[in-house]
Image: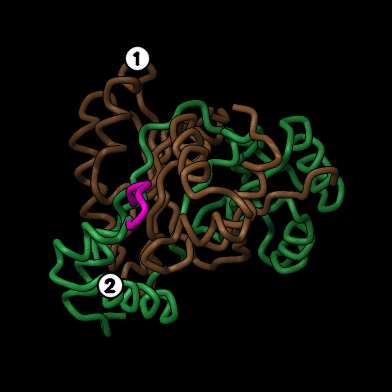
Chain colours: A green, B brown
């Protein structure tokens, strides 16, 4: 971590705000930070290359494009964890998967084109593993910040 | 919103990000043989409809020293949730905040809030702010720390016709 200087730090914070839809969208921020656009863009490219930023661009909401998502959880016996993990991850619909400190120790997100497909994949995983897949679809969203203070 | 073939092409072109050049929209428009203004109009429409949440940087929490990631879960009085939920979602350290169904009897929690911090102690400290916000509406809570990333892929849009 922390090999980034104060300017980079301020940049990481500022770049989490929405970029304007203008011909030269970086110009106002560059001016505010006392950098040229090129200097600013070089810094952004370096932050990308070093992995401090995983991405710079539009955040798409696949649900708004007609996709379906569901957070799922499973209680996987410790001695079968790796095997079940392989079975679950083999499905391309599994977008991310985390091991967590709880009786429900495997948490993943299913991302499908249609809501029906969520049930189909969940059922298939249950058949393959013999374990229950609990579904926790989002009912309401209370603002997504995604901001991280650098 | 329904997205057409041009929107789809724009989304595919931008999935890995915006080019880091002074006039990125002109550059992308060039790739897609669109006029820059048309591209900007379409991006504006996608923002309006929520297909694009915003155009911004996605920082890596780990690289910024935020190595503890706690999925805090809460059993909150249903009647109070609508009022308190947005306040929790607005906390600067909460990155996602959702109401989800309970799965009784094992899972009494109906509110999920992802809390990031530089240590579990820091996550725990921040958690207390949520406890304070919930007040009497809080019935039970737990924190599930991620102990391993088992898979992480970005959004992959299938090609039309798949």
Could you give the CA–CA distance between mark 2 and mark 1, rounded to whole angstroms? Answer: 48 Å
Tell me which segment is drawn in magenta. A19-24
Q: Position of residue B39 (x, y in %)?
A: 52, 45
Nearest the viewer among A42 and B57 is A42
Residue A126 location in percent, x, y? 80, 45
Please, what is the dominant secondary structure of the magenta stretch?
loop
For the residues labelled 2 and 1, say whether their Cβ atoms are less than 8 Å apart.
Answer: no
| Residue beneath disc 1 | B79
Q: Against B68, is A130 above or below? A: above
Q: Nearer the observer, disc 2 or disc 1?
A: 2
Residue B142 visible: no
Magenta span includes A23: yes
The foreground one among B107 and A118 is A118
The image quadrant that residue B96 belongs to is top left
Along the line of sight, the residue nearer the viewer: B135 or B162 = B162
Above or below residue B46? Residue A128 is below
Q: Residue at x 16, y 76 (%)?
A: A6
Q: Secondary structure at mark 2?
A: helix
* Name of the residue lying farthest toward the top: B79
Identify the mark at residue B90; answer none if there is no mark.
Answer: none
Q: Position of residue B46 (x, y in %)?
A: 51, 36
Which residue is pictured at 27% across the width and 26% down the height? B84
Q: x, y percentage for residue A83? A: 77, 66
Q: Which residue is mark 2?
A: A40
């Amino acid at each position: 971590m922390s090999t980034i200087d104060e300017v980079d730090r301020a940049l990481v914070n500022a770049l989490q705000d929405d970029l304007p839809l203008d011909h030269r969208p970086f110009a106002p921020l560059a001016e505010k930070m006392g950098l040229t656009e090129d200097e600013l863009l070089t810094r952004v490219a370096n932050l990308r290359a070093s992995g401090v930023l995983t991405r710079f661009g539009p955040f798409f909401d696949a649900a708004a494009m007609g996709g379906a998502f569901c957070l799922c959880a499973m209680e996987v016996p410790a001695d079968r964890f790796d095997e079940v993990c392989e079975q679950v991850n083999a499905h391309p619909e599994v977008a991310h998967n985390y091991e967590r400190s709880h009786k429900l120790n495997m948490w993943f997100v299913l991302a499908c084109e249609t809501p029906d497909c969520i049930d189909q994949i969940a059922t298939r995983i249950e058949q393959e593993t013999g374990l229950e897949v609990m579904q926790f679809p989002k009912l309401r969203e209370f603002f997504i910040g995604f901001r991280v203070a650098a | 919103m329904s997205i057409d073939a041009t929107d789809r092409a724009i989304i595919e072109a931008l999935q890995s990000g915006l080019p880091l050049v002074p006039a990125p929209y002109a550059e992308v428009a060039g790739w897609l043989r669109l006029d820059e203004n048309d591209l900007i109009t379409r991006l504006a429409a996608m923002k309006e409809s929520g297909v694009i949440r915003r155009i911004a940087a996605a920082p890596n929490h780990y690289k910024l020293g935020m190595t503890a990631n706690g999925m805090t879960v809460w059993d909150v009085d249903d009647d109070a949730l609508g009022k308190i939920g947005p306040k929790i979602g607005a906390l600067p350290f909460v990155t996602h905040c959702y109401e989800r169904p309970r799965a009784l009897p094992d899972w009494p929690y109906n509110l999920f809030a992802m809390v990031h911090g530089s240590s579990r102690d820091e996550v725990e400290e921040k958690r207390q702010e949520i406890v304070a916000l919930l007040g009497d509406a809080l019935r039970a809570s737990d924190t599930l720390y991620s102990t391993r990333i088992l898979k992480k892929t970005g959004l992959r849009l299938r090609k039309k016709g798949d």
